[in-house]
Amino acid sequence: MERIDSVKKLDESIKTCTEQFEAKIKGANGKRAVVVCGGTGCIANSSEDIQKALEEEIKAHGLQDKVTVNHVGCFGFCSQGPFVKIFPEDTLYRAVKVSDVKQIVEEDLIGGKVCENLLYIDPVTHEKVVRQDDINFYKKQVRVALHGCSLINPDLLEESLGYDGFKALKKVLTEMTPQQVIDEILASGLRGRGGAGFPTGRKWQFAANVQADQKYIVCNGDEGDPGAFMDRSILEGNPFEVIEGMMIAGYAFGASKGYFYVRAEYPVAVERLQRAIEDMEQVGLLGDHILGTDFSFHAYLRLGAGAFVCGEETALLNSIEGKRGMPRPRPPFPAIKGLWGKPTCVNNVETLATVPYIIRVGAAEFAKMGTEKSKGTKVFALGGKINNVGLVEVPMGTTLRTLIFDIGGGIPGGKKFKAIQTGGPSGGCLTEKDLDTPIDYDSLVAKGSMMGSGGAIVMDEDNCMVDVAHFYMDFICNESCGKCSHCRIGTKRLFEMLTKVTNGTATTKTLDDMKYLATVIKNGALCALGQTAANPILSTMVNFPEEYEAHVVDKKCPAHVCKKLMRYVIDPNLCKKCSLCARNCPVSCIHGVVGKEPYVIDQSKCIKCGSCLAGCRFHAIIKE
């Protein structure tokens, strides 16, 4: 691609690339375009092999001049992947396997017939759905931060330019002053999507007000919540959009250097982001005097080692500087004194991905979506006990009920919904009474949870909420940096108390001690990791007091999850005396006489592995 060293060159490139991209999507170039999901989830499910097989099959049939094949970002509907989509018909095939490639090429690409066995089937109407937009999972979504994901090839700058890329950058460099950019972001009501929800424009304004010879913008891609993959998918699907957002931020408050901090466990995102930076440098969209203006900007990539605490902005800055990832006392805040002591704004991936959209359509249009205090959209990683696992972007104010049952498709197997954990380890569990709560920053906090970065884990009747709290506290203990004693020691003590609850050795005083210690940690910890560490405990104790009471008083786990409080029992009336359970038992704790006496489990030796339950064909073994 030629160098883009002026506004005129950018206009020409955008015009040419837009025509080419639209021709590809609409088939105006006389070709059909096949795209394959290139998100990490589908790659793990052989989508790269599917793409390679498509290329080979197309070549074998001599269709190279009639069909193009490339990969795109995450389609979002992860439980139905891998996806293959064909333009211009907009046909979407789901759960595609390598063995399906021959059929797709011969029946669809050559024969012009839709492969109906690969279409999505609506679980309510039982009808086959051809187009992506007609699937209920997508109908209530609005793609802002996910702009271009599942549509453009994230490795091609040309496709980004052909789908609105860098129009916003051109606008700010040619039509807006830095202060006007900040004012536009303030007017939009954009709040940080990384968890705290601090107004983005105010953060930029703080940094703009400080005089310094060097300022920095940092993109926080250290996504560490269990089950969260929002930022990873955005970086994988459209890295150019995030870079553009970072450049606009740099222009707004005077930063000439930007750092992407992305965890090394995201190799696909890292590779595509690095390639995007290099391609932009090569054509002149990154570097000195961009588009022939006075604005210069350089972007760099730094890899994190997987420390959850480095999602906290000051710990992240320490890590970039080569120090141990531990939070700094605030004030001074990073916008005043951040990276290497210079004014620094830290925004997460989703926040920066939203910025170009706001500049393109205007603050007023963006602010039409959402609620009074939470504008725009939010991306969620919907997982757990949910039919439609995947990536969801909805307007703020959408209710949990809509998210779980309309978009998410409800609970598998007809099980009853029990809770949803929002905000990851820092959030809390919300229950059936909260289903009509609008999803926004303030409403979730008022219910004892938080927005967080966007993780949403659904639980059903088979989940033990004490065990859920135990899992998150174990995670927090392992991820504490150890700098402050409240978090280093306090979370460990909380975990020990929870362990007593799950193994049946706790007392009612243990529960009182947990509540007291949780409050102490919340008020005294240095950073948000410790300050929110007790949220899963406090929210489950408030919403599910009967489960804690059952564990402590009755010494039983109602959900039959906590092994120390559970036992397997053989019903003598149902036992067929076949000895299969005894033969499957790894510790030989089941005894009886074949054909004569019912079998019995020695509870003192049973390790609660469940082999007997899984192997019994007569349903004679129960958990109690």
Image (cartoon, grey):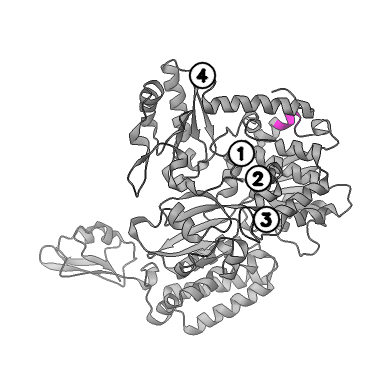
Dot 1 lies on which element? loop
Discs 4, 2 touching: Cβ within 8 Å: no
Q: Which tag, 4 or 1, sits closer to the chain's start?
A: 4
Q: Amino acid at mark 1?
A: Asn
Q: Which residue is mark 1?
A: 238
In this picture, residue 183 sits left or right of residue 418: right
Q: Which residue is mark 2?
A: 353
Cα–Cα gap, marks 4 and 3: 44 Å
Main SS, magenta region, reads: helix
Local crowd at mark 4 within 10 Å, few (<14), some, or many (≥20)?
few
* Residue closest to the eye, 258 or 581: 258
The disc at residue 30 is 4
In percent of width and height, residue 298 lies at 77, 38
Secondary structure category for the residue under label 3: loop
Mark 3–mark 2 CB contact (< 8 Å):
no
Left of 311 or right of it: where is 119?
A: left
Tags 2 and 1 touching, CB below 8 Å: yes
Q: CA distance from mark 1 to mark 3?
A: 19 Å
The location of residue 388, given as percent across then percent down, is 43, 50
Q: Is residue 430 visible?
A: yes
Q: Earlier in the sequence, mark 4 or mark 2?
A: 4
Q: Are marks 4 and 1 in contact (CB under 8 Å)?
A: no
Q: Which range of residues does the magenta coloring cover?
A: 280-285
Is 328 a magenta residue? no
Across and down, in percent, residue 575 comes to 16, 65
The answer to which of marks 4 and 3 sits earlier in the sequence is 4
The residue at the point 75 percent across, 32 percent down is 285
Give the Cα separation between the discs numbered 4 and 2.
33 Å
